[in-house]
Image: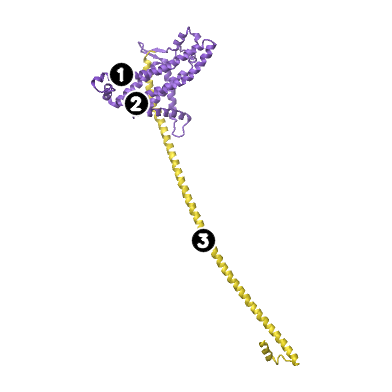
Chain colours: A yellow, B purple
């Protein structure tokens, strides 16, 4: 174990290796590492931001759904109101129509009754005339006694 | 393997001698070719690999290789940030280089020593030690480089005057009577830091290598020795994974701590 020129050569070699490392190896690798660290940090913050914007979007969607629900309720209520109004109107109209039909029917019945009465009156007059002529044993001329016959018919 | 050697001492000393190449007169002007070559090759391979990963690095979804490298970088960066509060942008790359370099040099210890030695013998290397951190030259080179950085940052942060002032006036006080004690104290500290820094790593790796050699020796003494030697060798290898990583970690942490301490004002 003698100290000799080897030591100086080894020291020079060591110095060269240090120079080489400091110039060609350390800076680019550190740069790569630091750039990647920055990229990762950026990515993480972007992710965080994305999460925040997702939360706000979810909130906005919830608001929109609530609004839509309220609107739908409003529309349903309006429809309900319109339906009941229409129904009421229809009912009133139907009632009026019914009454009108009933009135018309009543009028018709009245007429029918009047006509029947008239017929009945005529028949009774004829019967009365026939009876009377039988009683009088003579012919009553319809033409000669038209005035009398009409008078009797009106009295009935 | 031991059969080739006269005795165990020769086996061990053979495995612990460097492939040297004198380049000038005197003991100092010698180069441990094995240490320099191994550390250069694995260093270039490793940092080349890191560089390739860097070239293809993207800020998007990383490939598995890139994620692995980033894991190491992030680990070192966290450690540096928890200790060092200064502004220098060099400290983290220094820590990364130290950690990676020491780790791979230590990790050479995982290679089975005799198998590699056999292969190296086959290509003509009689002696070759391929664990650079088990060479005290390497650990001293690293520790003294860190020591130099420590002085450099001290002067850079406090100014030359401030640094010299601190040498004489801390930790005991600025009374002129205490200057000598302060200086002695600081000198002891400045000597002990690189010494403990380098010898801790060297001692661990050298001892680890030695134990592999002893177990290898035992494994060559018959069938029982082979079974026990191999079993213990496996156990020591597994335990050594911890030592290799831990020593690299400790070396890196001490590097950062020393540089951070150099920034402190007293």
Residue B164 percent location from the top left of the image: 27, 22
Q: Is residue B73 above or below residue A95?
A: above
Q: Are marks 1 and 2 in contact (CB under 8 Å)?
A: no
Inspect this view and state whether residue B214 appears: yes
What residue is drawn where x is 69% and y is 85%?
A122
Q: Secondary structure at mark 1?
A: helix
Looking at the image, is mark 2 or mark 3 nearer the viewer? Answer: 3
What residue is drawn where x is 68% and y is 84%?
A121
**C-alpha span from label 1 to label 3:** 102 Å
Residue A107 percent location from the top left of the image: 62, 77
Q: Is residue B46 above or below residue B10?
A: below
Q: Secondary structure at mark 3?
A: helix
| Callouts 2 and 3 on one subunit | no
The chain letter for the residue carrying disc 2 is: B
Q: Are marks 2 and 3 in contact (CB under 8 Å)?
A: no
**C-alpha span from label 1 to label 2:** 18 Å
Residue A98 percent location from the top left of the image: 60, 71
Q: Which residue is mark 2?
A: B260
Image quadrant where residue B138 sits: top left
Inspect this view and state whether residue A20 appears: no
Front residue (pair B109, A29):
B109
Q: Which residue is mark 3?
A: A78
**Label at residue A91:** none
**Classed neighbour count for the residue bearing mark 3: other residues with Cα under 10 Å, few (<14), some (14–19), many (≥20):** few
């Amino acid at each position: 174990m003698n100290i000799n020129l080897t030591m100086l050569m080894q020291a020079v070699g060591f110095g060269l290796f240090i120079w080489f490392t400091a110039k060609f190896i350390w800076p680019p690798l550190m740069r790569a590492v630091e750039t990647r660290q920055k990229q990762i940090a950026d990515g993480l913050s972007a992710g965080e931001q994305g999460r925040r914007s997702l939360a706000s979007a979810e909130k906005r969607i919830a608001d929109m759904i609530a609004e839509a629900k309220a609107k739908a309720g409003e529309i349903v209520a309006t429809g309900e109101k319109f339906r009941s109004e229409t129904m009421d109107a229809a009912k009133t109209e139907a009632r009026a129509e019914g009454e009108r039909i009933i009135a018309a029917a009543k009028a018709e019945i009245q007429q029918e009754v009047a006509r029947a009465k008239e017929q009945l009156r005529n028949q009774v007059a004829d019967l009365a005339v026939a009876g009377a002529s039988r009683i009088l044993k003579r012919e009553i001329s319809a033409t000669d006694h038209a005035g009398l016959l009409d008078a009797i018919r009106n009295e009935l | 393997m031991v059969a080739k050697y006269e005795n165990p001492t020769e086996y061990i000393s053979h495995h612990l001698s460097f492939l040297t190449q004198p380049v000038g007169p005197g003991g100092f002007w010698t180069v441990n070719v094995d240490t320099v070559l191994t550390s250069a090759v694995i260093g270039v391979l490793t940092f080349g690999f890191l560089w390739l990963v860097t070239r293809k690095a993207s800020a998007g979804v990383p490939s598995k290789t890139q994620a692995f490298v980033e894991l190491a970088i992030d680990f070192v960066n966290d450690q540096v940030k928890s200790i060092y509060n200064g502004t220098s942008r060099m400290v983290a790359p220094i820590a990364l280089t130290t950690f990676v370099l020491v780790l791979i040099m230590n990790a050479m210890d995982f290679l089975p020593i005799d198998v590699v030695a056999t292969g190296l013998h086959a290509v003509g290397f009689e002696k070759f030690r391929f664990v650079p951190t088990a060479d005290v030259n390497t650990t001293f080179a690293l520790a003294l480089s860190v020591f130099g950085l420590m002085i450099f940052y001290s002067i850079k942060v406090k100014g030359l005057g401030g640094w010299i002032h601190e040498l004489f006036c801390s930790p005991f006080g600025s009374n002129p009577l205490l200057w000598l004690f302060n200086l002695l104290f600081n000198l002891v500290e400045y000597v002990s830091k690189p010494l403990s820094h380098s010898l801790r790593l060297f001692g661990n790796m050298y001892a680890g290598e030695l134990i592999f050699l002893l177990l290898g020796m035992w494994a060559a003494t018959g069938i029982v020795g082979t079974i026990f030697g191999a079993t213990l060798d496996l156990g020591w290898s597994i335990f050594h994974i911890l030592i290799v990583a831990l020593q690299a970690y400790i070396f890196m942490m001490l590097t950062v701590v020393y540089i951070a301490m150099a920034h402190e004002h007293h």
